[in-house]
Image (spheres, helix red, strand yellow):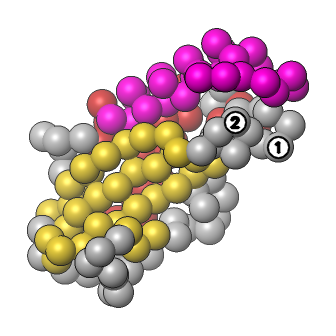
Amino acid sequence: MMCLMTTGPSCDNRFGYERELVRWLRAQLMPPRTLQDRRTLGTVTVEDVRVDGSFPDSRLVVVVRLSTRPDCRFGFRARIWTNEGVSKGALNDFPEAEDFAMILGTHLEETVMAWPGLPADCAPDGIAWVHANPMWQLWD
C-alpha cells in the first residue's frame, strides 16, 4: 500500500492505529457477543468490522445482521481521522486505539439497544446505514 500523505501521523503509525482500532472493536463486538434490538427484541450479530477508504478519509465500518430480519444488513460508519490527519479519538480525549474502540463500541451498543435503534427500512441487496445518536458526533 502506498502512503503519500505528508501531514498527520507517519504511514506506519496510522496503518497500525487503524489495525488496532479494528482489532479492539472486533474483540468488543464480534460473536459470541450479541446485542438485542430495542424495536424487535431480535438478536443483533456483528458480521464485519473493517476500514474503508484511505487516509485521511478512512472510515471504520461495522456491519450487523438482525435475527428477526435476516435478509437485511445494517451498517455503522465512523471517520477515523480529521482532514488534518488527527485521530478523532484523540480529539475526544481517547488517543489510544483501544480507548477509541471502546467508546465507538459503546455508542454502537447504545444506538442498537436504546435509541434510536436499527432503522425500520432496509434494502436486502445492500447495507442500510444507521445514524447513531447525534450527540456523540463520532459515527457518521
Secondary structure of residue under mark 1: loop
> Which image quadrant is residue 137 in?
bottom right
Structural crowding at the residue carrying mark 2, measured as other residues with C-alpha within 10 Å and reported as few (<14), some (14–19) or many (≥20): many
> Which image quadrant is residue 116 in?
bottom left
Q: From the image, tell me which residue sits under label 2.
A: 55
Our reading of the magenta stretch's main secondary structure is helix
Q: Which residue appears at 39% of the width and 27% of the height?
A: 23
Q: Is residue 74 magenta?
A: no
Q: Position of residue 134 (x, y in %)?
A: 62, 68
Q: Which dot marks residue 14?
A: none
Secondary structure of residue under mark 2: loop
Q: Position of residue 114 (x, y in %)?
A: 37, 69
Earlier in the chain: of badge 1 and badge 2, it is 2
Q: Is residue 8 magenta?
A: yes
In the rendered image, which quarter contains the C terminus? Answer: bottom right
Q: 65 left or right of 136?
A: left
Q: From the image, tell me which residue sits under label 1.
A: 83
Q: Which residue appears at 15% of the width and 63% of the height?
A: 43
